[in-house]
Image: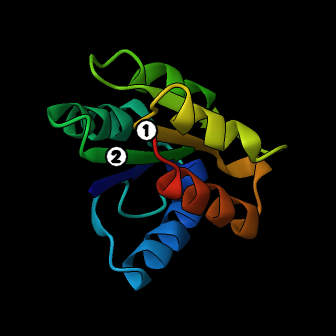
Amino acid sequence: MKIYLASDHAGFELKEQIKAYLKERDFEIEDIGSFAYEPDDDYPDFVIPAARKVAEDPERNRGIVLGGSGQGEAIVANKVKGVYAAHYYGGSLEIIELSRRHNDSNLLSLGARFLSKELALRAVDLWLRTSF
């Protein structure tokens, strides 16, 4: 499994924390950007390339994208054929499990403004551990 990460300015800090978490666990990752906090960047510039990478091998590749709410990121990612993006910004973690078990999501869109680091890492861990 290869995991592609992407975020805009609103998700940048949390993306970096998730990236460190995944590296510590020896996941193969590729950061698509942004690579620095840029308040004027635009999420499609990063999310679309990440979604396209997932779509190259949708059964093996995964994507984790972040934005303020995660909504726009999920909408844009779902426009890429072969991508099934799930959206999470808090509440029951069961929705994460169901997105994998029932819908075979291959991209997770997180709302960084609504998630603590701890909850985001729990969501990522559950999503990656749950099979279809």
Q: Which residue is mark 1?
A: 107
Residue 32 shows in the view: no
Three-letter residue code for mark 1: Leu
Q: Is residue 113 left or right of residue 131?
A: right
- Residue 9 is labelled as none
> Among all residues in the image, which is located at the extreme left?
56
- Vertical relation: 49 (above or below) 11: above
Residue at x 51%, y 61% (from the top left corner): 15
For the residue pair 101 and 1, the one nearer the viewer reads as 101
Place of residue 65 in the rendered image (x, y in percent of width and height, measured from the top left): 47, 45
Residue at x 67%, y 63% (from the top left corner): 122
Q: How many marks?
A: 2
Residue at x 78%, y 48% (from the top left corner): 114
Residue 50 shows in the view: yes
Q: Is residue 39 left or right of residue 78?
A: right
Q: Which quarter of the picture shows residue 43? A: top left
For the residue pair 9 and 52, the one nearer the viewer reads as 52
Place of residue 41 in the rendered image (x, y in percent of width and height, measured from the top left): 44, 42
Q: Which residue is mark 2?
A: 62
The residue carrying pointer 1 sits among few (fewer than 14), some (14 to 19) or many (20 or more) residues within 10 Å by Cα, namely: many
Three-letter residue code for mark 2: Arg
Place of residue 47 in the rendered image (x, y in percent of width and height, measured from the top left): 37, 37
Give the mark, 2 or 1, whose residue is nearer the N terminus: 2
- Quadrant including the N terminus: bottom left
- Vertical relation: 119 (above or below) 75: below
Q: Secondary structure at mark 1?
A: strand
Q: How is the image coloured?
A: rainbow
Contact flag, marks 2 and 1 (Cβ < 8 Å): yes
For the residue pair 57 and 51, the one nearer the viewer reads as 57
- Quadrant including the C terminus: top left
